[in-house]
Image (cartoon, rainbow, N blue to C red):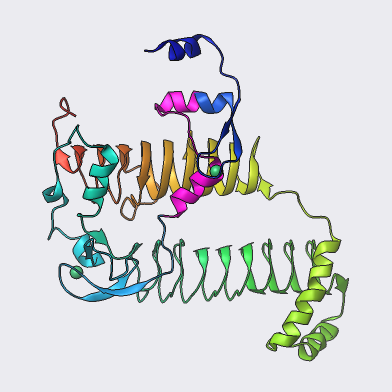
Amino acid sequence: MNQESKNYQHQPRQAETRICQNCGKEFTIEPEDFEFYEKIGVPAPTFCPDCREQRRIAFRNERALYKRKCDLCGKEVVSRISPDKLYPMYCKKCWWSDRWDPMKYGRDYDFNKSFFEQFKELLFSVPHVSIFNANTVNSDWVNQESDDKNCYLNVGGHFNEDSAYNTYELHSKDCFDNFWIFNSELCYENINCDHCYKTFFSQNCSQCQDTILSYDCRDCSHVFGCAGLRHKQYYIFNKPVSKEEYQEFLRNNPISSYENLLKLKEKAKKIWLSVPHRATNVVKSVNSWGDVISESRNAKNCWYSEKVEDSKHLYITAWLKDTYDCSCYGTGELCYEVAHSVGFYNSKFSMFGMGGNTAEKISSSNLEYCYEVLNSHNCFGCVGLRNKEYCILNKQYSKEDY
Ligand SMILES: [Zn+2]
Ligand SMILES: [Zn+2]
């Protein structure tokens, strides 16, 4: 132990301002952050939180999809990996089968070479899966999705039917072009809406039906261009109207005309801006900040996150505890720099661990620098493994040697 780290041991850490090595801007590391990094055994980051987020998201190709031939069976399939990439790609059926063995790509660790050089060589030699979707019916073009039926170009959602072009759609039907929509039906062009029916061009609405161009409305029906309403029916631009007046308005102002829609949007926007807005959508949460957070405690700098505890710097996450710096990740504890995955315990710098179809339990633990590794424990720098333990660069070790 050098003198510097000895000194740290006996002094409570102070917040430190550092310069991001990527964007050159200042960022702060709080005393609680140092405690977390010590607990999980990593050095403090050199990139700021935003640049760290960008680094994780850069690995996620959502909708740039291609037709590419499977390098095992030769069948042409939809792939998130373009045909010009030199590393092998297997179709879903082949990749998930026992027809190949990722351990065959295993290699000795060379202490004369950098780890990242060796990891990159392994990463580019092991076959990658064409696309991340599971348990889908007639939904070849959905990515990072599961349990869909008749869906097209959806990303990041689960349990949807007859839907297309949605990003993070859950348990919904007949929905097109929405971002972050749950338990809804016949919805189009909405952001952050749940339990809605026939809701179009609206934002932050809940339990609404026949709602158009509206913002922050709850338990409303037949409202048009409204904002901040609760338990209301038949309102146009935040003014009550009769049922007949409402229907006549719709007849005279069809949103099927794009020109007309743009005019109505302008008018609706004025109403949206006229009502007080919640500073953030943080609900049923304690000591938490960010936006669209629910049922969380001590969730800091978290965005689109629910049921998160003692965690920081998260984007699109759920059911996490004691976790920092994760994106598109659910069900985990003591994790750091994990993305596009489900169900890790005490794991770092890992991606695309999908844990099969069980989204609600821990399936892997003690992973570091693992990519497309499933149901595995105590692995370092591995790619494409499943049901393995004590592996380094896809090579098997005894527990003691590991
Ligand atoms: Zn930065
Ligand atoms: Zn194949």
Vertical placement of residue 30 versus 380, above or below: above
Region of the chain picked out in magenta, as a range = 35-58
| Location of residue 108 (image quadrant) | top left
Regarding residue 307, the answer to whether it shows in the image is no
Vertical placement of residue 100 versus 23, above or below: below
Helix, strand or loop for the magenta stretch, by majority: helix
Q: Is residue 357 magenta?
A: no
Q: Residue at x 77, y 90 (%)?
A: 251
Residue 266, given in percent of the width and then of the height, sits at 79, 75
| Horizontal arrangement in the rendering, residue 138 relative to residue 241 (left or right) | left
Q: Residue at x 15, y 27 (%)?
A: 401
**Front-most of residues 229 and 378:** 378
**Front-most of residues 107 and 147:** 107
Total tally of numbered discs in the picture: 0
Regarding residue 93, the answer to whether it shows in the image is yes
Q: Residue at x 43, y 68 (%)?
A: 63
| Location of residue 221 (image quadrant) | bottom right
**Front-most of residues 46 and 288:** 46
Residue 172, given in percent of the width and then of the height, sits at 52, 68
